Amino acid sequence: MNILVCISQVPDTTSKIAFTDGNTKFDTNGVQYIVNPSDEWYALVRALELKEGGGGIVTIITVGNADVDPVIRKALAIGADDAVRINSDAKDSYYVAAQIAEYAKTKSFDLIITGNQTIDFNNAEVGGMIAELIGWDYITPCNKLEVNGNVCKIESEVAGSTRVLEAPTPLVISAAKGMAEARIPNMRGIMAARTKPITVVEPAAVSPQVKINVFELPPAKAGVKMIDPENMDELVKLLHTEAKVI
Amino acid sequence: MSVLVFVEAANGKIKKAGFEGVTYAKNTADQLSNSVTAIVFGNADAAEVSSLGEYGATKVLHAKGDVFNNLDAGAFTSAVAAAVEKENADVIIFPFDNSGKAIAPRLSAKLKAGLVSGALSYPTTSGGFKVKKNVFSGKAIAEVEITTAKKIIAFTPNSVGAHKASGSASVEDFAPSVNASKIKLLEVKKQEGDIPLPEAELVVSAGRGMKGPENWAPVEELAKVLGAATACSRPVADAHWRPHHEHVGQTGIAIRPNLYIAIGISGAIQHLAGVNQSKVIVVINNDAEAPFFKAADYGVLGDAFQIVPKLVEAVKKFKASQN
């Protein structure tokens, strides 16, 4: 089974979020970058497990300039066989999806897996867009994935229920919690990653559909009001009369 | 021109996000001097479906067809696209829930319509079509401009609320031609708990401070008397003290209830990313240094095993006084 795993570089969870140029650009000063957690922990690791169980090739793809190579190496160290980098800024979700779709059309993948959401722009958009652009089915979120021949059995947890679905490949899925457990790259993987190929592909001509004009920080909290632990009636009263939530 | 809004019904009732979606669409349509058409999927009778008129829809298309039973995003996308064409819609509204996440991106790619996911407030439409949304897991807000002719917004549930307007809607059945689905729905397993977490207005959540799964009774009792859903932190889900679907946080689900009560949760940044959009946060913790207090509106410092039962009694007393 040939699997394409889409990964995205994102600022580390603990990064300070600040902006420059009149709040129009993300301040990258001092920011550490990581592979987006659901791309790495769930999408990539499950793809590797499927390969280990039934053979095949796991290719990772990302849209970014050369400065994302360290994050690609990390994914290779975890065990991906090879990597493709579309040589361009990730302008918006549609732009990214269209680049990946263009590449995927020239190959014969059975599965394309994305993480269910990135922790930077929180869009959850790229997987569905790829599916539409290449005319495949799309299932989100996938919390469990088993593959038997060309049939995928998927558990999808949605509000209040778990749906058990069956769908033939080729398929695009978005990976969420439960699909796999995070793996830490070992020394052999890290050494091997140094010599694995990163294929650089020039981007197709695609127009983005949205643009970010400006960022702002959310209003600061007024500060916590401490309540006497012996006086829960007071808390209930405040929740009713002041906060008006009960 | 019209604004089209995607609405779901289940078990004969319009889902809560459906009324909020129509409210969102009505505001947008008023700005553009357009009317609102709702496309409804799922089982509900005509009276229930036509109640969308009270929130500002003038027309309801009730989509019917077995093809929608398999929950295939492609089939829903084709149907919504057919409704966009029929209604000459130039703005399409979805809730940013599981259905919205499955369908809106496909529709965006199909119609070449720019999409903003996770909108926090109504769009502004003079001088560019702009929508504010959360980025960096709630640590910042971005103003996003959609530059295509057709536009799609997936709004964050519980962000603008559902508001009644005056009006009524005509209802018609809608049976678009949609390709047969290759996806088969084998089974739907109902999760425990009466209130699905993503839709809950009140949430009671607990973490490692509860010391073990056998100690959850007061947490569940508090949720029960409040009419709240239960949630938990990641370590608790990872240790299988609680089911995974209760896990809120960066790698679990993100929620936006009116009230989030965190019991014995320290408030790691990954947890806050999933709950920091809650309107009011109450933190109960025995560690004065717990970072969660900094994100809280109300804090109670002390032993949860003493405090929670007292809170349960206080809520019971309050509920009795309301009747």
Image: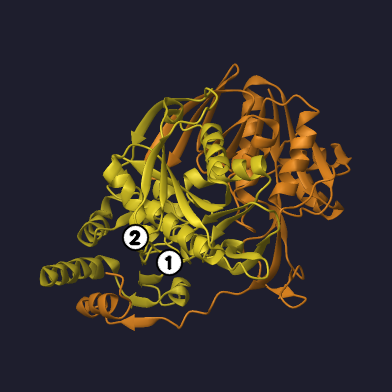
Chain colours: A orange, B yellow
Marks 1/2: CA–CA distance: 10 Å
Q: Which residue is drawn at 69% across and 36% down?
A: A133
Q: What is the crowding at mark 2: few (fewer than 14 residues within 10 Å), some, or many (at least 20)?
A: many
Q: Which residue is drawn at 52% across and 64% down?
A: B120
Occupied quadrant, residue B61: top left
Q: Is residue A10 above or below residue B79?
A: below
Q: Is mark 2 on a helix, strand or loop?
A: strand
Q: Along the horizontal axis of the image, is B291 left or right of B150?
A: left
Q: Residue at x 60, y 69 (%)?
A: B140
Q: Disc 1 designates what residue?
A: B278
Q: Disc 2 designates what residue?
A: B203
Percent of width and height locating residue B289? 45, 76
Host chain of mark 2: B
Host chain of mark 1: B
Q: Which of marks 1 and 2 is nearer the N terminus?
A: 2
Q: In this view, does A30 lie above or below A81?
A: below
Q: What element carries label 1?
A: loop
Number of marks in the rendered image: 2
- The answer to which of B292 and A125 lies nearer the viewer is A125
